[in-house]
Image (cartoon, rainbow, N blue to C red):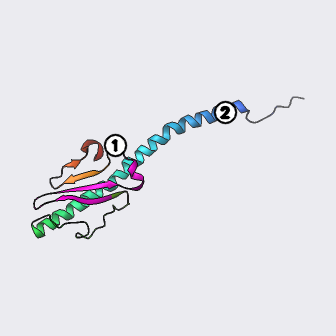
Amino acid sequence: MDKRIKGFNLIELMIVLVIVGILAAIAYPAYTDHMIATRRSDGQAALLNLSALMEHYFTENNTYVGATPTALGVTSASQQGYYTVAVSAASATGFTLTATPAGAQTADTTCGALTITNTNVKGPNPSTCWD
Protein backbone atom coordinates (compact mmCIF):
# COMPACT_ATOMS: atom_id res chain seq x y z
CA MET A 1 0.00 0.00 0.00
CA ASP A 2 1.58 3.13 -1.21
CA LYS A 3 -0.40 6.09 0.03
CA ARG A 4 1.04 9.45 -0.86
CA ILE A 5 0.08 12.44 1.18
CA LYS A 6 -0.99 15.23 -1.09
CA GLY A 7 -0.69 18.91 -0.30
CA PHE A 8 1.93 21.47 0.60
CA ASN A 9 4.57 20.94 3.16
CA LEU A 10 5.80 23.69 5.46
CA ILE A 11 8.97 24.41 3.47
CA GLU A 12 7.04 24.97 0.24
CA LEU A 13 4.60 27.27 2.01
CA MET A 14 7.44 29.30 3.57
CA ILE A 15 9.14 29.69 0.17
CA VAL A 16 5.93 31.05 -1.33
CA LEU A 17 5.51 33.49 1.57
CA VAL A 18 9.09 34.75 1.17
CA ILE A 19 8.56 35.32 -2.56
CA VAL A 20 5.28 37.16 -1.95
CA GLY A 21 6.97 39.28 0.74
CA ILE A 22 9.81 40.26 -1.59
CA LEU A 23 7.39 41.20 -4.37
CA ALA A 24 5.28 43.26 -1.97
CA ALA A 25 8.36 45.05 -0.62
CA ILE A 26 9.26 46.10 -4.16
CA ALA A 27 5.77 46.84 -5.48
CA TYR A 28 4.28 48.89 -2.64
CA PRO A 29 6.83 51.76 -2.68
CA ALA A 30 6.58 51.94 -6.47
CA TYR A 31 2.79 52.07 -6.20
CA THR A 32 2.81 54.87 -3.62
CA ASP A 33 5.31 56.90 -5.67
CA HIS A 34 3.09 56.49 -8.73
CA MET A 35 -0.01 57.59 -6.80
CA ILE A 36 1.76 60.70 -5.49
CA ALA A 37 2.90 61.64 -9.00
CA THR A 38 -0.60 61.02 -10.37
CA ARG A 39 -2.26 63.17 -7.69
CA ARG A 40 0.13 66.00 -8.57
CA SER A 41 -1.95 66.58 -11.73
CA ASP A 42 -4.81 67.69 -9.46
CA GLY A 43 -2.70 70.59 -8.20
CA GLN A 44 -1.46 71.40 -11.69
CA ALA A 45 -5.00 71.56 -13.06
CA ALA A 46 -6.13 73.78 -10.19
CA LEU A 47 -3.23 76.18 -10.78
CA LEU A 48 -3.79 76.34 -14.53
CA ASN A 49 -7.51 76.96 -14.03
CA LEU A 50 -6.87 79.70 -11.47
CA SER A 51 -4.20 81.20 -13.74
CA ALA A 52 -6.71 81.46 -16.60
CA LEU A 53 -9.22 83.11 -14.25
CA MET A 54 -6.53 85.55 -13.10
CA GLU A 55 -5.83 86.53 -16.72
CA HIS A 56 -9.55 87.04 -17.31
CA TYR A 57 -9.70 89.21 -14.19
CA PHE A 58 -6.75 91.25 -15.50
CA THR A 59 -8.43 91.89 -18.86
CA GLU A 60 -11.47 93.31 -17.08
CA ASN A 61 -9.70 95.26 -14.30
CA ASN A 62 -6.23 95.99 -15.71
CA THR A 63 -4.71 94.72 -12.43
CA TYR A 64 -4.31 91.47 -10.55
CA VAL A 65 -4.85 93.15 -7.17
CA GLY A 66 -8.05 91.90 -5.57
CA ALA A 67 -8.12 88.67 -7.55
CA THR A 68 -8.57 85.94 -4.96
CA PRO A 69 -10.06 82.48 -5.44
CA THR A 70 -13.21 83.71 -3.68
CA ALA A 71 -13.44 86.83 -5.87
CA LEU A 72 -12.97 84.64 -8.94
CA GLY A 73 -15.74 82.28 -7.85
CA VAL A 74 -13.67 79.19 -7.11
CA THR A 75 -12.91 77.35 -3.90
CA SER A 76 -9.43 77.15 -2.48
CA ALA A 77 -9.48 73.34 -2.61
CA SER A 78 -8.51 71.59 -5.83
CA GLN A 79 -11.11 69.47 -7.59
CA GLN A 80 -10.06 66.21 -5.93
CA GLY A 81 -9.00 67.89 -2.69
CA TYR A 82 -5.32 66.95 -2.77
CA TYR A 83 -4.19 70.60 -2.93
CA THR A 84 -5.17 73.98 -1.53
CA VAL A 85 -4.64 76.82 -4.00
CA ALA A 86 -3.97 80.43 -3.10
CA VAL A 87 -2.77 83.67 -4.63
CA SER A 88 0.53 84.01 -2.80
CA ALA A 89 1.52 87.29 -4.46
CA ALA A 90 -0.52 89.68 -6.60
CA SER A 91 0.43 93.11 -7.88
CA ALA A 92 -0.85 95.37 -10.60
CA THR A 93 1.27 93.59 -13.20
CA GLY A 94 1.94 90.06 -11.93
CA PHE A 95 0.94 87.18 -9.70
CA THR A 96 2.23 83.98 -8.17
CA LEU A 97 -0.15 81.13 -7.44
CA THR A 98 0.66 78.32 -5.01
CA ALA A 99 -0.89 74.87 -4.64
CA THR A 100 -0.06 73.41 -1.22
CA PRO A 101 -0.43 69.63 -0.75
CA ALA A 102 -3.25 68.49 1.53
CA GLY A 103 -4.28 65.16 2.97
CA ALA A 104 -2.55 62.14 1.46
CA GLN A 105 -0.56 64.36 -0.90
CA THR A 106 1.51 65.79 1.96
CA ALA A 107 3.71 62.73 1.43
CA ASP A 108 5.00 64.37 -1.78
CA THR A 109 8.50 65.23 -0.62
CA THR A 110 9.82 65.46 -4.19
CA CYS A 111 7.82 68.54 -5.18
CA GLY A 112 5.82 69.80 -2.22
CA ALA A 113 4.01 73.02 -3.07
CA LEU A 114 3.56 73.78 -6.77
CA THR A 115 3.74 77.34 -8.10
CA ILE A 116 3.00 79.22 -11.31
CA THR A 117 3.40 82.89 -12.22
CA ASN A 118 1.68 85.18 -14.71
CA THR A 119 4.60 84.57 -17.11
CA ASN A 120 3.98 80.80 -16.87
CA VAL A 121 7.11 80.13 -14.80
CA LYS A 122 6.40 76.87 -12.99
CA GLY A 123 8.00 75.63 -9.81
CA PRO A 124 9.57 74.14 -7.88
CA ASN A 125 11.14 71.93 -10.57
CA PRO A 126 9.31 72.02 -13.92
CA SER A 127 10.95 68.94 -15.43
CA THR A 128 10.14 66.76 -12.41
CA CYS A 129 6.98 68.29 -11.01
CA TRP A 130 5.14 69.46 -14.13
CA ASP A 131 5.95 66.85 -16.81
In reply to whether residue 46 is colored magenta, the answer given is no
Q: Quadrant of the C terminus?
A: top left
The residue where tag 1 is placed is 110
Three-letter residue code for mark 1: Thr
The x, y position of residue 7, in whole percent, is: 75, 36
Q: Quadrant of the N terminus?
A: top right
The residue where tag 2 is placed is 14
The x, y position of residue 40, in whole percent, is: 34, 51
> Could you tell me which residue is drawn at 87 percent across and 28 percent down?
2
> Could you tell me which residue is drawn at 18 percent across and 63 percent down?
54
Residue 110, quarter of the rendered image: top left
> Could you tell me which residue is drawn at 25 percent across and 46 percent down?
124
Mark 2 vs 1, N-terminal side? 2
Give residue 101's mark: none
Tell me whether the residue at label 2 lies in contact with that at label 1, contact meaning CB atoms closer than 8 angstroms: no
Magenta residues, start to end: 84-109
The x, y position of residue 127, in whole percent, is: 26, 42
The x, y position of residue 130, in whole percent, is: 28, 47
